[in-house]
Image (cartoon, rainbow, N blue to C red):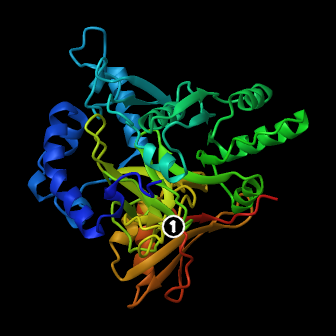
């Protein structure tokens, strides 16, 4: 069997980078004609200059909260007589397809609405399924939801692209899932890892074996190594995939089991939470993705997830960027003395002090006695009084400035850390 889904997975990293950024300006020019929200974001931008990561970093990150706000405002402003079509009215101007051109529309918590275009394997998960063992002629038992959110459709369209047959199991009904597996003998499971364990334990209690099941692609929650090993003892090889309802597949695991490899046709960045600025490779930050998807052209979309770039090329031979996997959420907004403090406020304060190389705002104290301390790494002299005044200007709260040694702050992507005691 071929080791790779397609040859692009092993092309040189430099060639991939050049191809992506040579395509980006024309892609954005064409997408802007169909997606009015994207056109508004790019007003005044010389698209021809967006041909490098440095140039791309000058475009503000579009975070999920802003997308939600854009969609909500579009819903409120639209009326039955509006000339705006669904691209503006429903999707806040960020979709390039309206009803008819969009095959399905999904809803995520918020609600945020996502279109599905008509391209085969629209969500890009065929690559992850292939890496996990799926091949033409297999039966895939799909235990992701088919309702409201796109997870079920993501895996089904991917399996169809690989010429696999799909059983739409959906979620719940554990006993029926077991009986269907026993009768149909699927080769692969897709769904959350915890539900697969529940199914297998239910099969044990029913006295049924599922010997046909040999592969699993899991997503939607953590997939601990202990569960990977537990499945392996039952003859099931399980891998994980990382994606979102907005972007489809972002990254996926391979037999190397050394991080997750970024999907093709997207530009992946890691930025400091609350900012638009990329961090050095290896530093934890927010995953930001530009996917060259003509139906839903999201530019520098902030996922809200934390991760970090791994150095080098995967031992499996795939050459794309690797990330460590999901490391938590980037939105660390915290209420201090009755006021919300956002990572963006900390970032704006630090932007005025280039002498600070890294910092972390730590909120401590017992309930009702909040103490806010900004721990600072710096290689040059820092005027702590001026820095404290800047923090107060941005947050409207007093903060203690504590100078710490360079390299002492954890590399975990946290801008705000809440260590208060609530006992």
Question: Vertically, is 355 above or below 57?
Answer: below
Q: Position of residue 320 (x, y in %)?
A: 37, 63
Q: As drawn, is 115 to the left or to the right of 30?
A: right
Q: Position of residue 322 (x, y in %)?
A: 44, 65
Task: Identify the residue at image location x=75%, y=42%.
Answer: 211
The part of the image, by quadrant, that contains residue 408 is bottom right
Q: Residue furthest front?
A: 1
Visible in this render: residue 107? yes
Q: Position of residue 342 (x, y in %)?
A: 48, 56
Question: Vertically, is 243 above or below 170?
Answer: below
Q: Residue furthest top?
A: 81
The part of the image, by quadrant, that contains residue 33 is top left
Task: Identify the residue at image location x=33%, y=24%.
Answer: 102
Please name whichever residue, 162 or 266, is drawn nearer the observer in this view of the structure.
162
Circle 1 residue: 413
Please name whichever residue, 264 or 212, is drawn nearer the observer in this view of the structure.
212
Count of numbered marks: 1
Please name whichever residue, 6 or 338, is drawn nearer the observer in this view of the structure.
6
Q: As drawn, is 1 to the left or to the right of 48?
A: right
Q: As drawn, is 220 to the left or to the right of 347?
A: right
Task: Identify the residue at image location x=13%, y=47%.
Answer: 26
- Label 1 residue SS: loop
Question: Vertically, is 216 above or below 310?
Answer: above
Q: Position of residue 354 (x, y in %)?
A: 33, 78
The C terminus - image quarter:
bottom right
Task: Identify the residue at image location x=51%, y=51%.
Answer: 242
Q: As drawn, is 217 to the left or to the right of 58?
A: right
């Amino acid at each position: 069997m071929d080791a790779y889904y397609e040859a692009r997975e092993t092309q040189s990293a430099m060639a991939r980078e050049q191809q992506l950024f040579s395509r980006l300006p024309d892609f954005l020019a064409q997408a802007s004609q169909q997606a009015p929200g994207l056109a508004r974001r790019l007003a005044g931008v010389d698209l021809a200059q967006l041909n490098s990561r440095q140039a791309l970093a000058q475009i503000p990150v579009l975070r999920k909260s802003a997308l939600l706000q854009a969609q909500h405002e579009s819903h409120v402003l639209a009326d039955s007589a509006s000339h705006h079509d669904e691209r503006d009215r429903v999707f806040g101007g960020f979709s390039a397809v309206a009803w008819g051109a969009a095959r399905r529309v999904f809803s995520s918590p918020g609600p945020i609405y996502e279109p599905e275009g008509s391209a085969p394997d629209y969500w890009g998960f065929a690559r992850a399924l292939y890496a996990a063992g799926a091949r033409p002629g297999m039966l895939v038992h799909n235990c992701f939801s088919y309702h409201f959110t796109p997870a079920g459709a993501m895996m089904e369209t991917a399996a169809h692209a690989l010429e696999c047959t799909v059983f739409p199991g959906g979620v719940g009904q554990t006993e029926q899932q077991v009986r269907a597996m026993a009768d149909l003998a699927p080769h692969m499971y897709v769904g959350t890892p915890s539900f697969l364990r529940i199914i297998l334990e239910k099969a044990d209690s029913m006295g049924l074996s599922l010997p046909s099941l040999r592969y699993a692609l899991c997503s939607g929650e953590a997939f601990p190594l202990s569960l990977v090993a537990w499945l392996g003892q039952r003859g099931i090889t399980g891998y994980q995939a990382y994606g979102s309802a907005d972007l489809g597949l972002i990254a996926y695991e391979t037999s190397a089991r050394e991080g997750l490899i970024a999907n093709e046709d997207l530009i992946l960045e890691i930025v400091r939470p609350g900012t638009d600025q990329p961090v050095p490779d290896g530093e934890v930050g927010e995953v930001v993705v530009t996917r060259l998807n003509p139906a839903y052209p999201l530019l520098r979309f902030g996922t809200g997830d934390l991760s970090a770039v791994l150095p080098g090329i995967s031992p499996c031979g795939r050459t794309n960027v690797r990330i460590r996997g999901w490391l938590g959420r980037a939105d660390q907004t915290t209420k201090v003395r009755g006021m919300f403090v956002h990572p963006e406020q900390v970032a704006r304060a630090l932007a005025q002090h280039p002498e600070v190389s890294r910092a972390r705002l730590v909120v401590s104290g017992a309930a009702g006695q909040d103490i806010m301390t900004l721990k600072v790494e710096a290689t040059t002299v820092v005027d702590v009084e001026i820095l404290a005044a800047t923090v107060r200007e941005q947050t409207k709260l007093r903060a203690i400035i504590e100078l710490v040694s360079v390299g002492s702050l954890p590399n975990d992507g946290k801008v705000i850390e809440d260590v208060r005691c609530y006992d």
